[in-house]
Image (cartoon, rainbow, N blue to C red):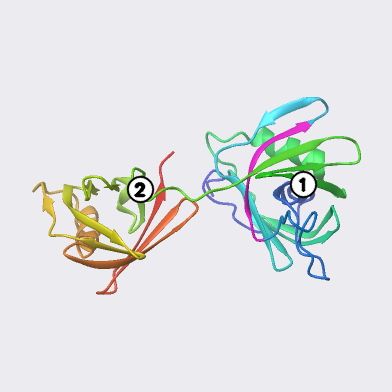
Amino acid sequence: MDRQKQRMTLTAAAMLVPLMAACGSEKADSGSGSVGAERPVTGVRWSVDSVTADGKTQKAPTGAHVTIDKGRAEGSFGCNKFGADATVDGDRIRLSKTMATEMACENQPMAFEKALAGALSDQELKAKVDDDRLTLTTAGGDTVRLTKATDAPLAGTKWTVTTPKADGRAHLTFDEKKGTVSGRLGCNKVNAKATVSDGHITLGPPATTRMMCEDSLMADEKTLLRLFDGKSKYRVDHQTLTLTSENGTSVRAVAER
């Protein structure tokens, strides 16, 4: 089995607990869910910025984040996904029953995950919120720094289509000033009028190039074309865009960094 693409089995590994902690804090049984009455840490997606352990600071990989809500802390540290039970008691955060995937990802700083684990594993964390920033500190003084994540803007973002897959070749970019959308359907380039209003996007008839590609790409392209010359609901959740047309076509895309 290719370890770089597989090994997705969940395991209660201690090294993953710290990441959960770095993620933030969770609602206590009392339902407080905050560090200070006006500074909530639950119900917020926190992007992990860095971890400082043994005097050395390491920058977090792109995509490292955590969301804490309804007694759970869930997220990703860039390569592996994780989840844990979480509670908040005042400014103290406790995590338990941590579960995480065990992938070895190419071009990802796996050493960061180990450093984060060493700093936060099985420790009570003190949380401090300062505007849109969260700092988690261990009893030994190691720290994890996080920032409140914001949604990617619909317009001006290059949205790479993930469903259908299209081998990562399909992408769309909306231009608010011009009222257009342009990009690639996987094989062919596309342009069309685009009107955004009240959670909906109305796309005009598509103008495309006329290249022929492998069957799989052409099939994905046909699906994407169903978004055009019609109206779709849209939703942006952090870095993910979901489009659902009136004819039942559903397309997901992620913001390219």
Front residue (pair 132, 81): 132
Camera sees residue 188: no
Q: Which mark is residue 176?
A: none
Which image quadrant for residue 234? bottom left
Secondary structure of residue under mark 2: strand
Q: Which residues are magenta?
A: 43-52
Residue type at mark 1: give it. Answer: Pro
> Where residue 159 sits: x, y (%)?
35, 48
Is residue 156 something one can see in this rendering? yes
Task: Name the residue that disc number 2 marks.
Answer: 159
In the shown orientation, is residue 253 left or right of residue 96? left
Q: Secondary structure at mark 1?
A: helix
> In the rendered structure, which amino acid carries the disc numbered 2?
Trp
Q: Position of residue 226 (x, y in %)?
A: 21, 65
Image coordinates of residue 203 in percent, x first then y, are: 20, 60
Q: Residue furthest top?
A: 55
- The percent position of residue 92, horizontal first and vertical second, equals 86, 53
Mark 1 lies on residue:
18
Q: Which residue lies most toward the right here?
A: 139
Residue lying farthest front?
Answer: 38
On whether residue 45 falls in the magenta region, the answer is yes
